[in-house]
Image (spheres, rainbow, N blue to C red):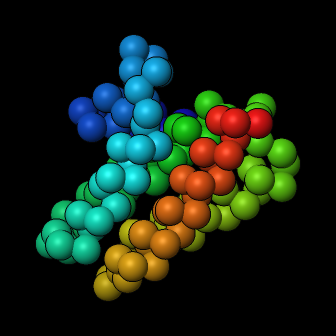
Amino acid sequence: MNQPALRDPLVSRLVSPATASFDQLAVLGQMLPDIETTTRGGQVYMMRKIVDGLEAELGRRTDALADIGQRRVRRLLNDLRKQAARLAPVPSQFTDEAELAIALLRRAEHA
């Protein structure tokens, strides 16, 4: 888990043990449509928060995900990080990959 990101109030709320019963994947999914309508700075901020949240969720589900699922989610997270770092990110590509990562992590809840 990325410790500096935990200082951010949004991420702290998302990954706090006190909110463990809270559906964090749903919150991350609800943030995705807003990426399309925000400024470039807002896009970068939201993309980073979503990646941080997905990393935290992957950490929680490592035991429930098969190795191949873990590798797939890690590749998606790497792609998401690269997309967020681009000078001109493609919000629709980020959203599509983030939705796939959420779906894979959601499967681990039911495994």
Residue 71 is situated, as x and y percent measured from the top left of the image, at 76, 56
Question: Which residue is painted at 85% across and 48% down in the image?
Answer: 67
41 on left or right of 48: left
Residue 19 is situated, as x and y percent measured from the top left of the image, at 39, 21
Given residues 9 and 105, the one toward you in this image is 105
Residue 109 is situated, as x and y percent measured from the top left of the image, at 65, 35
Question: Which residue is painted at 70% across and 36% down in the image?
Answer: 110
Q: Is residue 40 visible in this depiction of the protein? A: yes
44 on left or right of 28: left
Residue 42: quadrant of the picture? bottom left
Residue found at the far front of this picture:
110
Residue 36: quadrant of the picture? bottom left
Question: Which residue is painted at 44% across and 72% down in the image?
Answer: 94
As displayed, is residue 81 above or below residue 60?
below
Residue 76: quadrant of the picture? bottom right
74 on left or right of 98: right
Residue found at the far left of this picture:
39
Q: Which quadrant would the C terminus be assigned to in this image?
A: top right
